[in-house]
Amino acid sequence: MKLYHSDEVARRRALFQKLSRGRIGEVVNPDGSGKIPQFNPPWREVFWIAPALYCGDEADIALANRMIGRYFSAPRAWSNEVPKMSDGRDFNIFLSTSCATLLREFAPLATPEAREILEFHTRLVFRTYAGAAQPDLKFHGCNDNMPMMATKGLLLGGEFLGDEAAQRHGLWNLNEFRRLLSRSAWASEFNSSTYSASTLCSLAKIGELSHSEEVRALARDCEARIWAEILLHFHPGTRRSAGPNCRSYAVDWAGHPHSLQVQLWILFGAELSGYDIPADLFGAEPDPLQVVHFGGNYMQNIAEFCEFTSADYHVPEELVPLLRECAYPARTRGRSESMMRYDGMAGEYHTENYMEQEFSLGTVDTPLCGGEQTAQLYATYKLRPDVRTYRDSASIFYRFFTSPVDLDRIGHSVDGNSHSEENSFHQGWSYVLQKRNTAILLNIPALSGAPLTAPVLKLDVIFPAHYGRIRRSVLGAEPVREGAAGESAKVVPVSVEAGEVFVHVWPLIPTSEPRRAAVRFHSGKRYECLELVNYEGEPREFSREELKLMQNGFVFTIDAKSHWESLEAFHAFHSEARILDYTISNRRFVRFHRPGVQFEICYSPSPFGVQTCAVDGRTVERPVIESTRFDVTRLPFTTGEVAPDLPFFPWGDSMKMHNYPDQPWQIGSRGLPQEAPYAACRTFPGSK
């Protein structure tokens, strides 16, 4: 059965654009000015929504031109991206590269006033300082969506305006991404419902619009790899993107409609993707439980999605069945590269995803930065036997908190007229290891803020309850209770029944400070939590050395209810474990053993390093890329000789970064054939 139909994609795109045009009057006046700040300069939404308007009738096109044409005549306002007060003339990686794409696609429809704005920002893209060609916008193991936007702007804008240097830089960027994928399974900003969507959109635009056959072919091969990354992690059983993922917001953690889900809908429709985007975004009665990004402002989301839905994507036909088919159990593993983690050290990511029909469990050993946005452990599971939409399934994740955080708290959009759930950030440093449906997570508080004054130090296992709650729970040797209920002063194992699965959590809490309970449930309106507590009481100052010893963690197991006679039997089996957990010489030694799984870890949380990482007594193998779901050797760049990099160094004698001007830099050798190695060394001014 063919799952992908180009005519259906075109129909859904036209529908989305029509619905978007029908709502534009809510936020934009007839003269093109915004009714709310987000649709006035220097915000990017003006350019994001333009594709839908340019694809409309004469009145829609005229409105797009008025919105863009007035961009430099509006009063100065705050820009979140720059960030500073701006009159709309500052380089902004989001809007400036969007201008380059709009110029390439819609220049014949633009008025002279609108074209002036588009050309102005496109020329900003070409700059090597405060532009898309600056050194902090190359592929360096972080935020891949931004260098890919830069690549799009350099190539498409460079071709349109005849700037050969920009085109060379864009091609070099694209080859740098190829080289990353030649040694890695995933992009550095991997499997993100927010940012992988942006990377895919930029690649699709390049692959469709570039004048160069070489560029189009390379972009489509890179796009194929990102589609493999996304679809290998899609869990057909729950109709959700499974974990792990590099960067997430509240909408992504909950698994509600966001950028990637819009792309899956436009390509495959509601039945396959599990998301009915017109109903979710344009319905007459908004779902009060649905998490909506940008503080609940639907039109900001719709504007962003207008850019994403305007792209012509190139999904390899052989990957499409991954959206529906999976031979369970399934396992996918891979590596990628991280510019910064914990105290700032570079490193590798090692990801794993395990799937059965009723659930998925995904992990990545280390996070981006401190793990504020990284889903290092992320599970999805069925709420009901028959899953038709994302509301029939749910997710499970975690947070470490150093301050009281209400997960149900509501935040407002910039204009103040909308509201939705606020994002909460992980405030700990975690390390994770997995075997099939079981994972171990070790944690300390993030040391970046040390010394830290805190009224609470606790690790939460979080169950979103928007569309289904925990049915039953059991702590230690206590009887089973209805719902998520109970607490224990002792560190005891916990099991829950949720939807079609059982979940077992063995807390690993060697640090016992004053607290009312070691383990307890908390139930809110939208989230239920299992709290694993180190400390709670009056605000107290903890030194860096104290925080390094404020250790927490858990062993997490998820399984289908159908595999077990009862919750009691499941709990009894998984609670029979032997645990060794101690710290000496700044190294935490943990051994966890029960039938079917052994974990052994020795690591130093700070400075970070791993001495022992073993499953069932053997050092864990770390493949570059492997999956039981698809022959990964069929993917671009996974086999054969890797072409060398292109000799290219566009930054001359300075690598000063506009966004980080005080960061040190040094040029030793530019790698140019006409220049002897180390013939023209340069160092950050003032450094010795």
Image: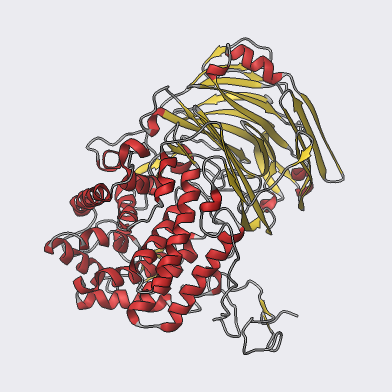
Q: Is residue 583 left or right of residue 76?
A: right
Q: Name the residue at 49% across, 21% down.
A: 500
- Quarter of the picture containing the N terminus is top left
Quadrant of res 162: bottom left
Residue 446 pos. (x, y %): 67, 47
Q: Is residue 18 left or right of residue 437?
A: left
Q: Is residue 294 left or right of residue 354?
A: left
Q: Image height check: is 265 above or below 69?
A: above
Q: In the depicted view, which residue is nearer to us: 428 or 403? A: 428
Colour scheme used in the picture?
A: secondary structure
Q: Name the residue at 46% across, 60% down.
A: 221
Q: Name the residue at 64% across, 35% down.
A: 459
Q: Furthest-left residue in view?
A: 58
Q: Name the residue at 28% across, 47% down.
A: 5
Q: Is residue 92 visible to the viewer in this orientation of the structure?
A: no
Q: In the depicted view, which residue is nearer to us: 366 or 2? A: 2
Q: Image height check: is 412 above or below 384?
A: below
Residue 458 pos. (x, y %): 65, 35
Q: Is residue 603 visible to the viewer in this orientation of the structure?
A: yes
Q: In the depicted view, which residue is nearer to us: 554 or 438? A: 438
Residue 585 pos. (x, y %): 87, 45
Q: Image height check: is 54 above or below 263?
A: below
Residue 167 pos. (x, y %): 43, 78
Q: In the depicted view, which residue is nearer to us: 403 or 344? A: 344
Q: Is residue 44 left or right of residue 183?
A: left
The tally of labels here is: 0
